[in-house]
């Protein structure tokens, strides 16, 4: 019975969000209250679960996601993203332009949230396609595939970061494993898949081509642009490597543990960006602070979605649903890595949001992982993240962004964007399963 109630709750959530267009947070709240009542919880327990669900889920994430948004805003507004793209395309040349675009997309995608990253890189894609006279999708898909992979696999993005916190996975290891898997996945879904798209000739609106790009002489240097955009990766990766060789109780170990804490790493990254991309370039502190304020406002909706998923997970836990599902599925022969991917993929296809799909799946998988201790939680994060990107279609905002910016038909969007996302998802699962044999 608890499993049936859980399935009904998920279907109702999908119905409220996808069909009735109810706000995702409100939908999560309504469904969670309904599930709590259905499993016999009284109103005081439900109220307590709501409070603890929000606190336990958002508590470890607000600083990371807030600073992540601020860093992305500084990278975009300063012209650092434009500098990275322009420089890499010069280095790779016209012949290997796709690989340069993919690398630029990955670098830009690490600090920027997906929608913001998309808006930033599309004008750059159009400008480079016009300059090189290459087909638009041939140039653009590698960069957008890399953005998608960063969104689904790599902290500090909301979904992988939130999933990692819930599964008590190491953020540093998740990032390192994610980058290892990201390289072949981006290669398949980006440059290799894009070679099949030369037959498409989208004709975007002229208004999009007129999006303002900064003059080259006003751009920050390439070194500074790369350093600030990649600073979270540098800090987390370097500290993780050093901690592998030194005692965590020694002075060096404690110092690295402090710097490698995700909250501290993001704070340091933002402070470095404020100086190099703001103050050093002549911007006044009040102007920079307004940029950071706007950046934090931009993630308020994402924070509410994450809070809603936390409520749902807490109700499942307090109501005994999670324990029941865990006991029911613990003897299944299907690998938890595959099961997590499959559940996330199904919810993603039904509801559209990768973040909602990933976070909803965590609540279902937590009790299963409790009896499968041999599964690396970092790989579970990546498996769920890969599933949450599966088959983007008409209920996903990214689908419409791609369609409208590139002025494609619905059919063409399915054959390009949807196919690219599906390749990312399936290849991501394959990468997780392969890596599972080596870690």
Image (tube, grey):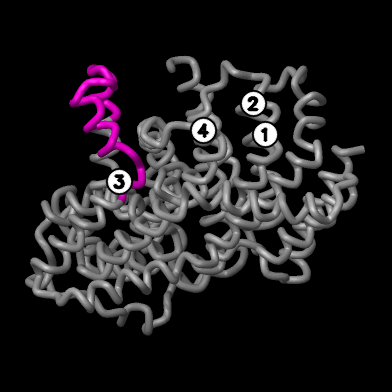
Of helix, strand and loop, which one carries label 1? helix
Q: How far from the left and from the top, in percent, is residue 67?
A: 35, 57
Q: How far from the left and from the top, in percent, is residue 253?
A: 24, 25
The residue tagged 4 is 168
Q: How far from the left and from the top, in percent, is residue 72?
A: 32, 61
Q: CA distance from mark 3 to mark 2?
A: 29 Å
Which circle's residue, 1 or 4, is located before the other in the chain?
4
Residue drawn at the location 37% of the way across and 63% of the way down: 136
Left or right position of 291 against 432: left
Q: CA distance from mark 4 to mark 3?
A: 18 Å
Q: Which mark is residue 369?
A: 2
Which circle's residue, 4 or 3, is located before the other in the chain?
4
**Can you tell which of label 1 and label 4 is closer to the viewer?**
4
The residue tagged 1 is 365
**Dot 4, crowdedness within 10 Å: few (<14), some or many (≥20)?**
few
Of helix, strand and loop, which one carries label 3? helix
Which of the 4 quarters of the picture holds residue 71?
Answer: bottom left
Which circle's residue, 3 or 2, is located before the other in the chain?
3
Q: CA distance from mark 1 to mark 3?
A: 29 Å
The residue tagged 3 is 264
Q: CA distance from mark 1 to mark 4?
A: 13 Å
Residue drawn at the location 85% of the way across and 47% of the way down: 41
Main SS category, magenta section: helix
Q: How far from the left and from the top, in percent, is residue 393?
A: 63, 58
Residue drawn at the location 68% of the way across and 20% of the way down: 371
**Dot 1, crowdedness within 10 Å: few (<14), some or many (≥20)?**
many
**Dot 3, crowdedness within 10 Å: few (<14), some or many (≥20)?**
some
Of helix, strand and loop, which one carries label 2? helix
What's the magenta region?
240-266
Furthest residue to the right? 1
Which of the 4 quarters of the picture holds residue 245?
Answer: top left
Kindly check if marks 2 and 1 are in contact, taking CB atoms under 8 A apart as contact: yes
């Amino acid at each position: 019975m608890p499993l049936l109630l859980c399935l009904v709750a998920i279907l109702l959530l999908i119905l409220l969000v996808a069909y009735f267009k109810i706000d995702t947070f409100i939908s999560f709240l309504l469904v969670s209250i309904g599930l709590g009542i259905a499993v016999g919880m009284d109103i005081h327990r439900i109220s307590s679960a709501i409070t603890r669900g929000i606190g336990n889920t958002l508590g470890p994430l607000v600083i990371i996601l807030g600073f992540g948004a601020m860093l992305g805003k500084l990278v975009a507004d300063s012209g650092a993203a434009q500098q990275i793209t322009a420089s890499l395309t010069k280095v790779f040349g016209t012949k290997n332009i796709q690989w340069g675009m993919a690398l630029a997309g990955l670098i830009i995608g690490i600090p920027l949230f997906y929608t913001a990253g998309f808006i930033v890189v599309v004008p750059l894609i159009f400008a480079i396609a016009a300059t090189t006279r290459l087909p638009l999708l041939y140039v653009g898909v590698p960069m957008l595939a890399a953005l998608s992979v960063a969104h689904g696999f790599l902290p500090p993005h909301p979904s992988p970061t939130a999933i990692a916190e819930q599964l008590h996975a190491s953020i540093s290891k998740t990032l390192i494993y994610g980058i290892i898997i990201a390289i072949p996945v981006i290669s398949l879904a980006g440059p290799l898949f894009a070679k099949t798209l030369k037959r498409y000739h989208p004709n975007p609106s002229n208004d999009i081509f007129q999006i303002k790009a900064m003059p080259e002489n006003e751009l920050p240097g390439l070194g500074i642009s790369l350093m600030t955009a990649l600073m979270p990766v540098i800090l987390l990766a370097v500290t993780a490597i050093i901690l592998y060789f030194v005692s965590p109780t020694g002075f060096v170990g404690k110092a690295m543990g402090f710097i490698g804490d995700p909250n501290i790493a993001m704070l340091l990254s933002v402070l470095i960006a404020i100086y190099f991309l703001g103050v050093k370039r002549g911007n006044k502190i009040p102007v920079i602070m307004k940029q950071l304020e706007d950046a934090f406002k931009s993630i308020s909706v994402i924070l509410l979605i994450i809070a809603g998923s936390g409520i749902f997970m807490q109700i499942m836990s307090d109501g005994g649903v999670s324990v029941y599902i865990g006991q029911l599925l613990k003897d299944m022969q299907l690998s938890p890595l595959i099961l997590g991917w499959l559940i996330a993929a199904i919810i993603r296809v039904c509801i559209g949001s990768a973040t909602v799909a990933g976070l909803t799946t965590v609540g279902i998988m937590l009790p299963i992982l409790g009896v499968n201790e041999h599964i690396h939680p970092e790989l579970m994060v990546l498996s769920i993240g890969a599933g949450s990107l599966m088959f983007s279609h008409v209920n996903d905002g990214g689908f419409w962004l791609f369609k409208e910016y590139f002025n494609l038909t619905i059919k063409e969007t399915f054959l390009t964007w949807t196919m690219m996302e599906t390749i990312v998802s399936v290849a991501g699962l394959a990468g997780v399963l392969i890596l599972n044999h080596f870690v």
